[in-house]
Amino acid sequence: MGATLSKKVRKGQTYSTAPLHAFVALLPPSKSKSTVFVTVGRRSIELTPADQEQIRSAVAQIDKRTPRVATAYTPHLTTQQAANALNVSRQYLTRLLDEGAIPFYRVGNRRRLNPRDVLDYKRQRDGVRRQHLDELIEMDDEDGIYAREAEVFGQPSP
């Protein structure tokens, strides 16, 4: 890595590139095909080999003092898009957000949701629904409700 440890940003302000170099040093060799998981707070971020190479390249560009603009597209959903994905009304989704059932962030006064959080909620909700349906099926098997209904309508019982 380069020898530059700090770089002047604005008059009187500097930032250190030492943490960047330390982070790059923790990554597997560039020829490695392994994925790395980085945990920040409670969030875990997956870095594919392509992501790792972009980080190495960005640090090298900073060292050469020719920074390049790198923008990451972070998809986010509006409340209407998330409501459509969950097959609920936007008003119901807003109530879920206010109750803290799904994490969100604000852009101005608008709410935005991470698609992964929406899918996690959907999986959890579907799991609870499946569990309740299994309980109902088990109760029916014990009580034989459908067998009695079939006999009433003249169909053979299963």
Image (spheres, helix red, strand yellow):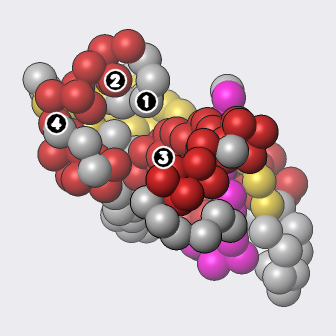
Disc 4/disc 1 C-alpha distance (Å): 13 Å
Vertically, is 55 above or below 121?
Answer: below
Q: What type is the residue that disc 4 sits on? A: Arg
Judge depth for marks 1 and 3 and give the one in front.
3
User: Are the residues tagged 1 and 2 within 8 Å (C-beta)?
Assistant: yes
Name the spot of residue 82 as percent of width and height, x first: 28, 47
Residue type highlighted by circle 2 = Leu
Give the mark nearer the N terminus: 2 vs 3: 2
In the rendering, at what x and y percent does residue 55 appear? 61, 64
Instruction: Report the Cα–Cα distance between label 1 and label 2.
Output: 7 Å
The Cα–Cα distance between marks 2 and 4, rounded to whole angstroms, is 10 Å
Instruction: Please provide percent x and percent y for residue 94.
Output: 23, 25
Is residue 47 one of those drawn in magenta?
Answer: yes
- The residue tagged 1 is 102
Camera-nearest residue between 61 and 65: 61
Q: Which mark is residue 90?
A: 4
Q: Identify which residue is drawn at 48% across, 65% down.
A: 154
Residue where numbered disc 2 is placed: 96
Cα–Cα span, label 2 and label 3: 12 Å
Q: Considering only order in the chain, which callout, 3 or 1, is on the residue closer to the N terminus?
A: 1
Give the magenta part as a residue range.
42-54
Amino acid type at circle 3 is: Lys
Compute the Cα span from label 4 to label 3.
Answer: 15 Å
The local secondary structure at tag 3 comes to helix
At numbered mark 1, what does the secondary structure look like: helix, strand or loop?
Answer: loop
